[in-house]
């Protein structure tokens, strides 16, 4: 194909649907995928032939760069269906821009906006039945880009594959979450890729998280690699501390992901006259606040869980429990965000994005 | 298959060989692979069904963990053929142990020694014709492990694939190498995965390296992420500085790869009464030494290039050139190592490993 037509979206519908075999009441996060996916290949210096097609396996050379050098980035988004059957995205432009920011840091060519949204909407429309109505039901959307070029030379690939796959999700009670503040292991270096949703950032956390689990914690709150004195993020969530009636959260930097839910919470807090201090948060002040009884809440923010309340934390061998708050900020923000996401509340910040049928 | 037989090596020979289509005089590093590969899958808590089989593409679910979370590690080794047609490996046990060290840090199950060596030797014997005689010719061996389990939950996979692929390599003149000392970007954090051959460590370097290339440098010498005052490693090579007649190199730690060539050079230096100081090497002392004319050589060590002399370096906008040394240490170590690798010199340290026919 020639100029102009290389970015025309092709649509190939699956001949059958597997939707009837899915138990939507008992979904495990990220385990089942819809009937279709979007793919687009980068070759000879351009993205070409975007296609929405039946979901299915990829065939790659064993020497494909992604297997060896982790040249891969991803995003996480959700689609929600309102009571009228309309499908909504939440601030998708933010995710799209962050995908390209991540790509740039990983030396992956940026993806064109129009192709992203055209493909995503076509995909969501084909798999519209997979998005279930009801507060808490959603479709988790996973755009990602992988380096597919064959050859183990340690240099950026010249060929890539962009994909979007979708997985139906349920708002589920994930059990009580207790976290431990990192004292030895680290997630990201200054000048590294911590701010990017780079594949390697995640695999690197599994081992320390396993060790934390053995001690009864579900997640780690990462501290700065240098001193371990400042609290940064939880690896798949940004993190907020409520001390008294104030909220504290770390500023984003080159180690910390600029979370969409995080920034939405900051906006909602400000709108509701809750003071948010975006600044370095020290381990010491949080431990001190916990000892004095001033630490009211800790919660994580992220697309998968929206708001994830933290029930307790560990530091330096000590364990702290947090009491349930009647005026829980975590609960307030969760409800507020979900009401916007499900088109129940007014969308005064223009965060909702309607998927055109 | 049942207990005991799950780790029995199966061998499937390729029906045809593509060796005749390969131009062995004009090999590009890591571009062409031999007729066979080794594969072994991890499933239900065990490695099973190791197989040497025809080289060919892998089929994976789009949701396979490796694409999303970079849960992948690798190794680099070489096989050499001596004048009698015997094939030799260089300290392969070191690579094997490091593979498992990397795997452990990435929460990947360790691979069994016997299966590794049995499969590797069977593979090398099947593809023996691909290993060409002659000083400088070798077969680059790439063992790697990828997380194959489907599903985008951010947790360690329960299924993996171990592979070994091989690529014929030539000792080639890669052009003059100039490096720049990192001042802003970083490779690894304290408490991170820098010491491991984790896939994500490599993709993260591509973008800063591209920027360095635009300024006329081929590689970056990474400094500590914290202060950028100490020189660590070059990302695919460990790095040595010769000041006067002394060699300086950084100690390995959780940020720096414990290179096999690096430790071999240290041993050879000590044997030859060259003083090696394994300690933090500051940017300042190297720049000062360069200005005083005391900095005689910089060279990198790694499996792919063995010894890679550095012709010049840049720091803080200044560029420094290094003069060729008649008594070059880089050249000395390269020759010495290659003589051992090709079974020309005595192997007093027991580094050679003969591949049984």
Image (cartoon, coloured by chain):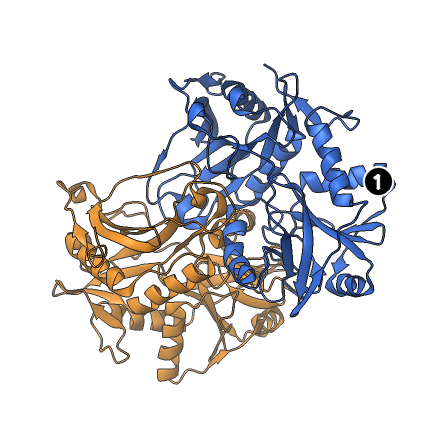
Chain colours: A blue, B orange
- Which residue bears the numbered disc 1? A270
Q: Quadrant of the C terminus of chain B?
A: bottom left
Q: Position of residue B135 (x, y in %)?
A: 23, 62
Quarter of the image for residue B352 reads bottom left
Residue B326 visible in the shown view = no
Q: Is residue A143 left or right of residue B20?
A: right
Residue at screen point 11% across, 65% down: B84
Q: Is residue B121 left or right of residue A184?
A: left
Residue at screen point 39% across, 37% down: B61
Q: Position of residue B68 (x, y in %)?
A: 48, 43
Q: Position of residue A183 (x, y in %)?
A: 63, 66
Point out the residue furthest to the bottom here. Answer: B273
Residue at screen point 36% across, 58% down: B75
Q: What number of labels is visible?
A: 1
Q: Nearer the viewer, residue B323 or B125?
A: B125
- The chain ID associated with circle 1 is A
Q: Nearer the viewer, residue A153 or B111?
A: B111
């Amino acid at each position: 194909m020639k100029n102009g037509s290389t970015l025309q979206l092709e649509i190939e519908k699956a001949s059958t649907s597997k939707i009837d075999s899915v138990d939507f009441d008992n979904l495990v996060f990220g385990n089942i995928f819809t009937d279709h996916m979007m793919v687009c290949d980068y070759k000879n210096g351009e993205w070409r032939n975007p296609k929405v097609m039946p979901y299915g396996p990829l065939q790659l050379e064993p020497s494909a760069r992604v297997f060896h050098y982790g040249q891969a980035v991803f995003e996480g988004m959700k689609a929600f269906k309102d009571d009228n059957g309309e499908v909504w995205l939440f601030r998708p432009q933010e995710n799209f821009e962050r995908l390209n920011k991540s790509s740039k840091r990983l030396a992956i060519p940026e993806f064109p906006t129009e192709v992203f949204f055209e493909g995503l909407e076509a995909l969501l429309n084909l798999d519209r039945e997979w998005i279930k109505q009801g507060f808490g039901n959603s479709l988790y959307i996973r755009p990602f880009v992988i380096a597919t070029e064959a050859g183990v030379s340690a240099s950026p690939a010249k060929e890539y594959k962009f994909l979007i796959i979708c997985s139906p999700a349920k708002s589920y009670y994930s059990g009580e979450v207790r976290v431990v503040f990192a004292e030895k292991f680290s997630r990201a270096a200054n000048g590294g890729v911590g701010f990017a949703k780079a594949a390697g950032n995640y695999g690197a956390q599994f081992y320390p998280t396993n060790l934390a689990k053995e001690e009864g914690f579900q997640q780690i709150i990462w501290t700065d690699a240098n001193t371990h004195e400042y609290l940064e993020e939880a690896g798949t969530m940004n993190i907020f501390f409520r001390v008294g009636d104030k909220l504290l959260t770390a500023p984003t930097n080159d180690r910390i992901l600029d979370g969409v839910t995080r920034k939405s919470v900051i906006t909602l807090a400000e709108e509701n006259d809750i003071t948010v201090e975006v600044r370095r948060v020290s381990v010491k002040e949080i431990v001190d606040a916990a000892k004095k009884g001033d630490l009211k809440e800790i919660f994580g923010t992220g697309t998968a869980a929206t708001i994830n309340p933290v029930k307790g934390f560990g530091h330096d061998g000590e364990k702290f429990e947090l009491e349930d708050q009647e005026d829980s900020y975590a609960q307030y923000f969760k409800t507020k965000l979900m009401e916007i996401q499900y088109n129940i509340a007014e969308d005064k910040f223009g965060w909702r994005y309607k998927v055109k049928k």
